[in-house]
């Protein structure tokens, strides 16, 4: 049985979450990973540590991954603002713009942009 200490490239305060019990915390709060070779497969993301609540693998949040990659996370409002004024207004709905993917609210526009992978 192997043990792996909680890890982070940017320090112990990086945010992590457990997808099993929805616990959130920091890498510093995670426990040692027990039997790692039995818990993950090749190609999977390496867990940051073990959840202190339920014992499942805890992984970096999107914010933590962005920190590791040196990226900034943008809010939906920031993403939509980049395109909003350049899109034609929908004549029937004042809160919508026309796109090649249908008419969108600001939130819908941001979701479409994220799905297409256009975020920085």
Image (cartoon, rainbow, N blue to C red):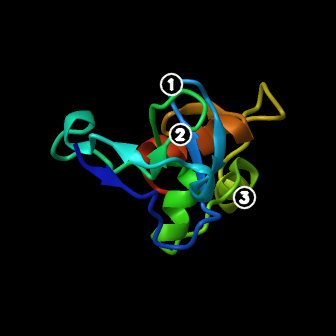
Specify which label sits upstream in the sequence, 1 or 2.
1
Say which residue label 3 marks.
78
SS for dot 3: helix
Q: Is residue 57 above or below residue 64?
A: above
Distance between the alpha carbons at the discs numbered 1 and 2: 28 Å
Say which residue label 2 marks.
112
SS for dot 1: loop
In this rendering, does residue 99 appear at all? Answer: no
Say which residue label 1 marks.
20
Q: Are marks 2 and 3 in contact (CB under 8 Å)?
A: no
Residue 55's label in the rendered image is none
Q: Residue at x 72, y 41 (%)?
A: 106
Q: Are marks 3 and 1 in contact (CB under 8 Å)?
A: no
Would you say 43 lies left or right of 33 here? left
Specify which label sits upstream in the sequence, 2 or 3.
3
SS for dot 2: helix
Give 82 or 56, whichever is nearer the viewer: 56
Image depth: mark 1 or mark 2 in front = 1
Could you classify mark 1 by the number of other residues whose Cα lies within 10 Å: few (under 14), some (14-19), or many (20 or more)? few
Image depth: mark 3 or mark 1 in front = 1
Taking the view exactly as shown, the residue that stands out farthest to the right is 94
């Amino acid at each position: 049985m192997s043990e792996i200490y909680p890890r982070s490239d940017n320090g112990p305060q990086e945010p992590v979450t457990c997808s099993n019990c929805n616990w959130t915390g920091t890498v510093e709060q995670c426990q040692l990973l027990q039997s790692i070779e039995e818990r993950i497969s090749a190609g999977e993301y390496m867990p940051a540590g073990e959840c202190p609540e339920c014992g499942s693998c805890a992984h970096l949040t999107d914010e933590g991954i962005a920190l590791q990659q040196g990226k900034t996370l943008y809010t939906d409002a920031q993403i939509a603002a980049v395109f909003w004024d350049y899109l034609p207004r929908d004549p029937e709905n004042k809160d919508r713009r026309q796109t090649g993917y249908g008419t969108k609210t600001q939130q819908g526009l941001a979701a479409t942009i994220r799905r297409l992978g256009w975020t920085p």
